[in-house]
Image (spheres, rainbow, N blue to C red):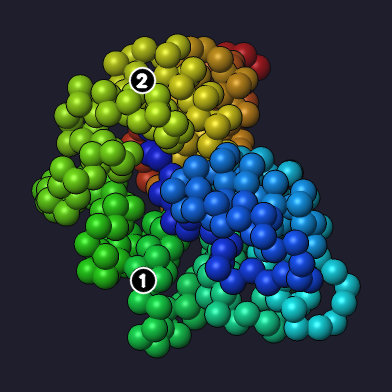
Amino acid sequence: MRLKDGYMKLNVKIICIICLSMAVCFAGGCAGKADSFYDNGNKQFAAGKYSEAADSFKQAIEINPDKAEYYINYGTALINMGEYDSAREQFLSVIRDTDNKIVRENNKKAYRGIALAYYAEGTYDQAKAYLELALKNKELTSVNRDLNAYLAECEMYLGDYEKSLKVWNELIDGLDGKNKESYGSYYLGRAKLYAVTGNADKAAEDYRKCVSLDKKCYAAYLGLYLMQTDSGDEQGAADTLEAAMKAFGDKQKESVEYYILLYYNKDIDNAKAGFQSLYDNGEKKAVYYLGRIAEDTLDYETAASYYEIYQTECPDELGADFYNQYAGCLTELEKYDEALELITKGKQMAAGTVGQRILFNEVIIYEKLGNYKTAEELAAAYLEKYQDEDMENEYEYIKTRYTKTR
């Protein structure tokens, strides 16, 4: 039996900018040339030229190693380059055990930076620990909402859905008319949590709220579309996709999001060309959908190669749905042990409909491995949780195979 597909992780990840304009120095001095490199680095960072920005910040540090903002911004650039260990080294070098306001402020920003480095690589327990350290710090309270949004995400990925929901509710209940640009992201984060836990109605409500606040919130459109597709609401899904395409229009043709919408709108040739062009120009996330397109055409070898690139180059984007998708591809290639490793990773992050698909596919992989005893046990456990005619049929077949092998 063909495994049940996953879909790409909906990610509310906020662009990792650590308050570049707020950094405070340890001491004065060495202003001229060092500050010139620092200013250039900020401009390069804002333009998305993270490697060039990192070089500029590094040169500023070499000239004047006494300014905390140089290290903080250097670490931020390194996160965006995927160099998480090196980024953490920069943030750690800022932290001091001195009790004064400037040091406390720098420490808070450094804790936040370390947390985001762990978050970006998917080490959510460590990210949570440093977010909590930052939140205990009483300085720079203006960044606490941002810290709590990341904390809510970490709680979700760690499987503590109750705590995650509590944090999102507090963020939304505390909206006061200020910083309205953040409002949509809070509803989007809570919608994702509702979707992960299988609360489709509330998820849809929050996705729509997000769109009402930000007409170009791609992730909300896509999240709502995928939920409607998953539930068989074809008309609703079509309407959502049409609204998204109208909202984005031709002006967004340089974005991955635009071509993802084309992909789901069945404009495969243009989507593929767009993804390839973006990937060739450094947009790493585009390679996932090149894999999806290859898999759709049953070219599993090519799809697996794209998924492996994506897994290596975009570790902060990996979720249960990705692991499920990649596992399905490897199963088609009869690489069952590798597929099972991915399913195991996905199980640790999944709930709701994604979790159900992963549990279904786990049964199939054990069956293909010839481990009918485990397949039977997992199938029985699955049927205790879900009503699924496909699994009922599979379970009856597995029992016949297990009986013959005993």
Give the residue drawn at x 69%, y 63%: 31
Frontmost residue, 119 versus 6? 119
Using the rendered image of the protein, determine whether residue 339 is visible from the camera's viewpoint. yes
Labelled disc at residue 181: 1
Between marks 1 and 2 in the image, the one whose residue lies nearer the viewer: 1
Name the quarter where the N terminus is drawn.
top left
Q: Position of residue 195 (x, y in %)?
A: 39, 57
Report how far apart the C-alphas of labels 1 and 2 lie in the structure.
37 Å
Determine the image quadrant of residue 299. top left
Provide the secondary structure element on which disc 2 rests: helix
Instruction: Please tell me the numbered disc located at residue 34.
Output: none
- For label 1, the SS is helix
256 left or right, relative to 234: right
- Residue 312 image position (x, y, % from top left): 58, 29
The residue at 24%/33% (across/down) is: 263
- In the rendered image, residue 199, in percent from the top left (x then y), is placed at 37, 62
- Horizontal relation, residue 164 to residue 214: left or right: right
Q: Which residue is mark 2?
A: 295
Amino acid carrying label 2: it is Glu
Furthest toward the front, the residue is 32
Residue 74 seen in the current view: no
- Front residue of 139/371: it is 139
